[in-house]
Amino acid sequence: MAALLRSARALNLSASPLLQIKRTSNHRQTISRFYSRTVGGRGIGVCSRQIISGSFNVKSLSPCSSAWPCSGTRYYGTPAEQKVVARDEPSLGVRNKQSHQFDWALAKLDSSVRRTGRVTKSLLQRIFHDICRTGYPSGNQALLLLRSCGSLLPELPLAERTEFAHHIWGKLLELGAAYDVSHYNALLKVYLQNEFKFSPTEFLAKMEAANVQPNRVTYQRLIAAYCQVGDIEGASKVLGFMKSKDLPITEAVFNSLVTGHSRAGDMESAVNILSVMRGTGIDPGPDTYLALLVAYAEKGDMDKIKETLNQVENTDISLMDRDLMQVVFTLTVAGHQQHVPEVLEHLRHDGGFVPDAMNLCLSLITQGHESTAFMLLKTFPSVQADSQNSNGPDVGNFFLRHCVNTNKSPEELVGFCKGLMDSNLHAAPMQFTLYCALEAKKMAPAIEVMKTMKEEGLPIRPHYFWPLLAQHKRDQNTAGTLEVLKAMQELSTEPDIDTYCNYVLRTFPSVDSARTALAVLGCMVPHWSFLGLSAVSSPSLPAIDIGVFRGNLIAAYFLLVHVCTGNLVPPRPENMAYFLYHLFDGMSETEVQAKEEVLREYLQQLHKKGICIPVNIYRGIRNILDSHHVPELIKVPLLCNCYTELNQEVASSSHTCLPSLPAGCSHSRVQQRTALIFKRLISAVCAEENLPRALELKAEHEDKMSPSCYALLINLCCRHDNPEEALNLKRELARMDSEATLDVNKYMSLLRVLSKHNRLEVDILKEMKEKDVVVKDTAVVLLFHTFSAVALRGDVAALRRLQDTTFALGLAKPTSNLCSPMVTMYLEKGDFAGALEAVMECETQYHQLPRIHDVLCGIVKKGDTELLQKAMDFVSQQRGEMTVLYDLFFAFLQTGRYREARKIIETPGLRAKPGRLQWYAEKCIGSNQMEALETMVDLTAKLFECDRDEMYHYLLCLCKDTNDWSKAEAVWTKMQEENVIPRERTLRLLADIFKTNNQEVPFEVPEVKQPSSVTAFSSVAYAVLYTSRSSAEAYNVLKEAERLGKALVPACYDALIKALLSSGSMEDAMAVKDIKQTCLSLSFPDALASLKTMLQMDQVPSQLALTRLVQGLGNHGDIKGIQEVASLIKSLSPSLNMSSMLFVNNMALAHIKNGDLERALEDLESLYTQTADHSQQSIAFVFRKVVEAHNDEAFDKLRTMAERLCHQFASYKPATDLFLQCLDTGRVEEARQLLQVASLRQRLRPFSISRGAAQTCRIKNLLELIPDFAEKELVYAYMMKCHAMDKNLEAAKALYRRMQAEGLQMNELSLKRLAQLYKKAGEPVPFEEPPETFKFYADKLKASTLPSPEDD
Amino acid sequence: MSAPGKKVFELFVSKIPWTLGTKEVKEYFGQFGHVRKCLLPFDKGTGFHKGFCWIGYTTEEGLHNALHKDPHVVEGSKLQVQQNMMPFTWRRMDKEAEES
């Protein structure tokens, strides 16, 4: 291809005079020729916009000129290069972790693009820098970066953008990024957007050399590139080539040709393209008209523009504001500004107007057309000063900032400020402009703006100059400092003490030099301000506000640290955290970065000394370090510990919401063996579905019938559709045991049978209510089937009675699904008016719109406009216009009325509703409707805030289901055409489709971290168990795991056993128990082996998995195993944040298990006697395990040890832990003894109780033992939390009274909890409920307890 | 409670526009009572203040006057004013030491 184009170039050169004359006809022929052979040109619908902007120098139009600079292609790597670049890859595991770190950054970039349609250079640079620093960019990271270098950077000049793109391209290549066709296409797009002139031939040659096959999008963009310079010949060559390859010619190609002809000076041909398009079956779209409008705009032909706009209005195409802005841009750049106001009148100010207009303003300013930009700015909607925020309007901040950044003259800046004030768009534009200038450290505009402000009578304050001085201070630029001081004099602003102390004097090398220099200026420096400088060296200072000197002192302290890193801990270690916070806060970004190593060393020293930092201060430090871009420092152990603690906090709070396990089995009640045998017999007969035999048995052994036997029989009767017998049995059961309750599923089958025979079902519902039977999960499905069955019979009255009773009794919530049978009934009959009535009734009664989609589809199909109008009016009134629009959109899509669907989705102001789109997409995927889904994806291309990757992901999901790889490939090409960056999961899905069809994957597949098989299977089993409550399915998962030789986490087995028992599958339960035993007893050696393999394969095991493993080994007394694990992960431990106590504790437990109690005690004791600090060392785990195992001997010895540690070594931690453990397990007596013997009373800190879960008994015990506990308010707060969790209003009320009696203040969070309890119970709240959210008060509380000391 | 001189009447003020300096903030809050201290921290690296400050009154009355006024608008910007619930560490520690 490249070769072909090269020859074309040569040909073009020689024949150019000739061709120029007959260009039009020649070209027309080309087009008709290839179009006669294109079939179904519309095959691929969405065409991205090839927005071609900017002025064009006609002289440079000559094709193939040497004007193509080579620099453009310099950066492509050949395959040889790609391979040669040494990739000293670190292990895959580490690489995986690194890639995760960037995800947030990329997400940030992505969201910026989605929200505002632009990115800032600094954000892009920061992410690029981060990726470079850590290396190993993935394919789509590279794609995202590259794509961002075009029109997404309106604040950067065009040339600079391309330069940045090339820089990124080269750098990432060096780092080992693998480029595929999507990258080359993205680069082409950037070239087009930046109007970068390059040689398409060379571009293709480079692709060829890199062994990357160009695709349809590549050719389309090359055509656009030729057309951008008016080279129709070049474009035609590529076209011919596309044709020979049977590639579909889409609208985008024609749009490029419109531009191409117009730039070649041939408007007639340009206009003609539209009819050529129609001739080939493609209707000109909005982009076609835009290309035409832009062409006229370049010529400044306002009449034609107006004519075209009118023409568009007569079609069903609508141009968006964004399109008109393109026209405005072109008019301006081509020097026809005078026409701009006329175009501006056509703007509709719809959905995304503001971000688009902002981007246009920025582009115009960047290219030196700020006066037009200002014209546009004035059309911005003026934001009304809302009551919440009485600050004046501030439209145009972005404008002023960009003007400052692009160095517009001070006069212009002042002019814009005055303009903004006059039109009431901005209350304080001068101040804001000054702020921008100061932020950018631009002295000249800053001073000029201040001069104007002074003239306007606005105050000029000394601290306005500080940002300028701060810069000079950093650079030690005395000349600059003096210049600023001079300016201050000119503006008659007297520098104050802070100005001198903090900024001026510290710029000078010595006090004397400062004095002399300032004297020359005639500054009267108060002599005592020099004290600020000398503060560091002389400690005997007069008492001045310490705040002034804090910065100096900390800096000085740090210098000392620098000199003698070693034994430097402030006298009060508890203040260390604050000191560190202020230290980091006081240092500038560059300072921290420069001293990163020293700081790291210092932090490590502190860590060794056992300094620890409270979590909330850690948060603050982390934020500072983040903002200083030294995230590495956070990973120092000292800070790391806090990090894990923070994570645990989050984890434990989410843990408490886990659903509780199914209730225990009822088998234990069956005591008599005969009864058991009889029940087995009954269930066996029931399993055989032998109703007569079962009833016979019952008659024979009336005395042995237990409630569960009755339940089985009733269920059997229901299955056999025998309501009479079922009711008889039920009555007998009630006589035998009036308390006996059937489970919900049996009630449901009973209900189904009764309603089928139209009998008494309301009574059953009432009984369920009385007996508190809850209908949820699978039972709801059964209920739905019952309703549907009635609906199927067409019995409106029965269905209504059933539904109304169920909902009125509150047995089940009226969901859309449960309400739907009523609607279904009418739909089945084709009675859409009736169906609509039913829907409307549901909405008024239960606020549900069941099956509205199907109803609308039916109406649309029937073409009943009146009914449709009625439906729309109703839904619109109930749910708002947005809901109606989506409902209609989907109904039109479903019925194949795509034109109407397009009209709907193009409604101005409509924005993407991800949930609704997902609903329809999943519906299409479920019912294999490719066409409807594809159309939806096409039509939503320009929908405001639509997540494009998500849309294409749906398409690929369907491709995956149908296993259609060629369709998938087309989808991928389309994504490139639309410039969409696929997320990793999309790429993986795509790769998966290719692979299953034995196709080569044309891009680098992102790596995926394999979860450990144990957790994977366990979580699957859990998920199955909890979501479907189907023990049988979970059992299948388990069997599968067993077949593969994988073990699950023990808790999972237990949950499953319970579930199986409660559903009566005794045998399965026993089988699971066996599996559990064999698996778990086998699994530890296996687990150890798999850990080794994992490490060899460079996978990083999860912290949880390791913890479990070590605990398991400890449980089995496997000391060697623990040692082995410890040595295995030694190298990994810094990155894993493993607690050293894990190994210590489990070693001790292993010793205890092996009967070597002495050894265990020895080890534990040495822990507390030999190391200096032990606040972080907790052996609570050992205590807990010993207590749980009822190992009294070990418990006693441990207790003695803890007491000894208290008395002899003043080490109270073990005793405290043991005390709390006793409280937890209800060993109040032991706790009391411990309290007395170890004199723990004063040692207990609120900190320690807050650590444990909030448990009522624990707190009650604590209060009982220590009635004079110091932090009563805190304890009460925890009690309130417990009561709230138990929903115990009475206890909570009592607590409130008690606190009032004791004269204690209840905090807002507790009050809020109490108020909620009152509300839930339906009682009035007898005090004023705190108005904010729970989170607000929780945060507030956290903030106020922030400095709680953690000594001992 | 500790000695009366130790008692603090502090405001925490946020959303302070950059144009206001220590002097202006102190002047504004001076209208409600005598201001004993006004701490408006500046970032020495950038030269801008951080947008929040602490105001300490000598009397409870000053504090209450300030809290009762709403909204606080200075030079067109609305300040967010609340009682300072986050006393400094050393103060808290002193208090604890005295109590035990």
Image (cartoon, rainbow, N blue to C red):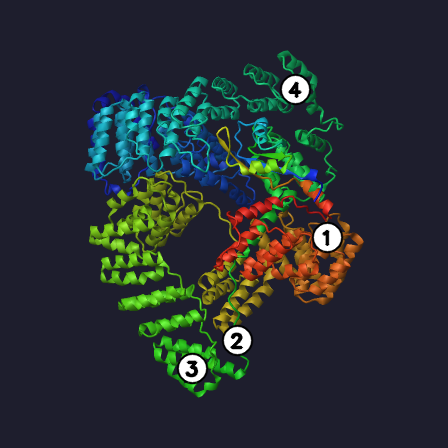
Residue A1243, numbered label? 1
What amino acid type is highlighted by mark number 3? Glu
Between the residue at mark 1 and the residue at mark 4, the CA separation in whole angstroms equals 53 Å
- Relative depth, front residue between A968 and B2: B2
Q: Position of residue A1308 (x, y in %)?
A: 56, 49
Give the residue pinned by disc 3: A732
Label located before the other in sequence (3 or 4): 4
Q: Within 10 Å of the Cα at label 4, are there few (<14), some (14-19), or many (20+) other Cα atoms?
A: some
Between the residue at mark 3 and the residue at mark 4, the CA separation in whole angstroms equals 102 Å
Total numbered circles = 4
Between the residue at mark 2 and the residue at mark 4, the CA separation in whole angstroms equals 88 Å
Q: Quadrant of residue A1106?
A: bottom right
Badge 4 element: loop
Label located before the other in sequence (1 or 4): 4
Image mark 1: chain: A
Give the residue pinned by disc 2: A667
Give the residue pinned by disc 4: A508
Label located before the other in sequence (3 or 1): 3
Q: Position of residue A204 (x, y in %)?
A: 37, 32
Residue A203 in view (yes/no): no
Residues tagged 2 and 1 counted as in contact (Cβ below 8 A): no
What amino acid type is highlighted by mark number 2? His
Between the residue at mark 3 and the residue at mark 1, the CA separation in whole angstroms equals 64 Å
